[in-house]
Amino acid sequence: MPYNYNGQNAAYNTQPSSTTVVRQVWATNLERELALIRDYIEVYPVVALDAEFPGVVARPIGNFNSTTEYHYQTMRCNIDMMRVLQIGITLSDERGNRPEPCTWQFNFKFSVHTDMYSAEGIDVFAKAGVDFAKHENAGIDFNDFAELLISSGLVLEPKVRWVSYHGGYDFGFLLSLMLAQPLPETLAEFLELLHIFFPSFFDVKYLVSFVKPNLRGSINDLAEQLYLPGLDQPHKAGPESYLTSTCYFELCYMFFQDGSEEAYNGFLFGLGPETEMSRPAQAYPLPS
């Protein structure tokens, strides 16, 4: 279905403001906020996702059949060893319109005294103003979140379209929470489960690799290429999910107004096919 993006090219601000408030979700308001999302999802079925976690703490050893398999095993061992700190989601409809509120940041139980993290990763979050004491004392329990998420209408639903940027870890953490067990040993098993829980999903970095193959870096770097304002303070899951949503619809506006983005449905950057695919029918240079 073609996406009739409702904005003009690079026309609106991606930074959450007084009109784009990030709803902070802790253990005490988890049930209420997910009930609100459940009320919105039928009208706003495009869900942009970002997960923030405290760094990469391990690398797998052994022989791997491909770079893709190595990337998956790296992701798997880190997700199995660590706790996700924040998950952000932003809702919109198929035209990029958003409800108010539209962005939620789920803050999970995490302890700097007992949980795994990298020194570099924890320093990044400290500089971003993360209140680790509040995460330890008021953070969301994983089991409570997973139970409510499964019944929310966001997952296991073909009509819901998920969007991420370099989304292996984003989806990996969500899947691990819902399974309540380690991720599957093989990439094939992981992808099979992923398509069950998330029947429709797009990775913005995967999309970009076919319209701007030389682009590297973060979602902020992509926003700069698209002449969209980036985030003054990255590594906050709510605002990053909002920026992911905005970049996705900007790309749809620029390249995929005929609906040709469907060719890239169900692929994750770094965990998808390693062969070159044909470029979209409508492709124009990104601003330089």
Image (spheres, rainbow, N blue to C red):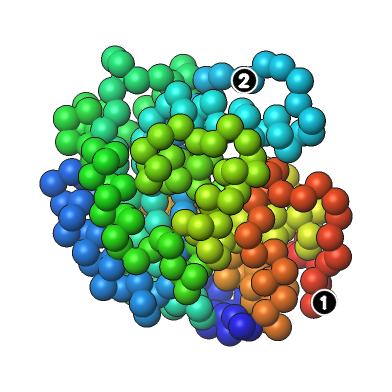
Which image quarter is the C terminus in? bottom right
The nearer-to-camera label among 1 and 2 is 2
Question: Residue drawn at (33%, 56%), measured in percent from left and top?
Answer: 150
Q: Position of residue 250 (x, y in %)?
A: 61, 70
Dot 1: what SS?
loop
Q: Quadrant of the N terminus?
A: bottom right
Q: Residues within 10 Å of mark 1 (few under 14, many from 20)?
A: few
Q: Residue at x 29, y 15 (%)?
A: 113
- With 239 as the anchor, is 247 left or right in this view? right
Q: Is residue 10 left or right of residue 276?
A: left
The residue that appears at 45% across and 45% down in the rendered structure is 175
Residues 286 and 117: in front is 117
Q: Which residue is mark 2?
A: 59
Q: Is residue 248 above or below residue 187?
A: below
Task: Please tell me which residue lies in front, 278 or 211.
Answer: 278
- The residue under label 1 is 281
Q: Position of residue 233 (x, y in %)?
A: 44, 43
